[in-house]
Amino acid sequence: MRFLAFAALPLSLALSVLMTFSAAHAAYPLTIEQPQGSVPLEQVPTRVAVFDLAMLDTLAALGVEVAGVPAQVGPAHLQAFQDDRYARVGTLFEPDYAALKALQPDLIIIAGRSRAAYAQLAEVAPTLDLTLSPDAFVDGMRANLQQLGTIFEKQQEAQQLEAELQQALHDVQQKTRGLSSVTLFTINGRVMTHAPGERFGMLYELLGTQSTAEAGEAAPRGQARPEAGSAQALKLQQAQRTRLDQALAQQPDWLVVLDRGAATGGEGQAAETLGQDAAIAATQAWQQGKVYYLDPAAWYTATGGYQSVMKTLQEFGGKL
């Protein structure tokens, strides 16, 4: 029996382990080791339920067929999964266990929003958690590609996609060498910034730019957001504003923007929100039109999907 211990290893080591399997088809049965426990697979999965849109994006890029998908299918290039031939197995947060029982999947793939349901899902079928860490984003994407390639005997396809990703990263980062940026998140007329290591901090790693935003103090894991209008909420907003102003004062070469309002089908207001902010409007980047608007659905609901990331790299590279 082969053992693939990915999530329990450092990413660099996990990737080297994965690469050793890429030259030949996997010898089933396989056992994948991850922090939540062992995931045994007797044969190549054929009825796969997916609860993470980034992983659905990546599986589609690999040419892997799936059977069950969440009710929300996110960015435009995943709209084909709204077809009735795909079973609806719940939302991004809450599995529909009756639908899963009817589907009888032989593999469940989760990440991010759905990982809290791991224990209960693992009682239904082997469950694989492919959550990406924002501070090791590219290595995580590469490891996931190789892992999925091994599981579905798509090693050559995974190697090709990884090579294309590496080339796209190289092409963009050759152009961005020495440039800076700040990642802005707009929601309800407010603007926040994300620094490396934070939720959308991986954009600096991808684009090869230096962040002008400094990381803020991390909230304790599991801590609830302060009540709107409370003294704590107002203090947090003030701290976010101070950090934003400090980042803008360094005159970033590019503003990289994610419009939360447009991420789930709402009306996009990012350009209006940014233009009405005096500090943003005063930056050279804004005045020179060096503003890149991310695909809202791709980055908010499918963060780390292979096709979404490649689109971003190609689009941003074309603007440089």
Image: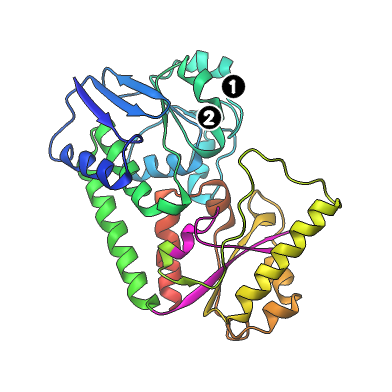
The stretch of residues the image draws in magenta is: 178-204
- Element type at mark 1: loop
**Vertical placement of 198 versus 283: above or below?**
above
Q: For the residues labelled 2 and 1, say whether their Cβ atoms are less than 8 Å apart.
A: no
On the rendered image, what quadrant is the C terminus found in? bottom left
> Colour scheme in the image?
rainbow
Residue appearing at x 68%, y 66% in the figure: 270
Residue located beneath label 2 in the image: 84
- How far apart marks 2 and 1 lie (CA) works out to 16 Å
Q: In this rendered view, identify the residue nearer to me: 181 or 36.
A: 36
Q: Where is residue 292 shown, x and y percent of the image?
A: 54, 71
- Element type at mark 2: loop
Q: Where is residue 205 shown, x and y percent of the image?
A: 42, 62
Q: In this rendered view, identify the residue nearer to me: 164 or 20.
A: 20
In the picture, measured across the screen, residue 223 lies left or right of residue 113, that is: right
Asked if the magenta segment contains residue 128, the reply would be no
Residue appearing at x 25%, y 43% in the figure: 13
Residue appearing at x 38%, y 39% in the figure: 59
**Vertical placement of 236 versus 127: above or below?**
below
Would you identify the image quadrant in which residue 224 lies? top right
Asked if the magenta segment contains residue 196, the reply would be yes
Residue appearing at x 79%, y 58% in the figure: 235
Q: Where is residue 77 shown, x and y percent of the image?
A: 48, 49
In the picture, measured across the screen, residue 207 lies left or right of residue 13, that is: right
Would you identify the image quadrant in which residue 212 lies? bottom right
**Vertical placement of 216 versus 316: above or below?**
above
Mark 1: amino acid: Asp
- Mark 2 or mark 1: name the one nearer the start of the chain: 2
Would you identify the image quadrant in which residue 255 lies? bottom right
Residue located beneath label 1 in the image: 96
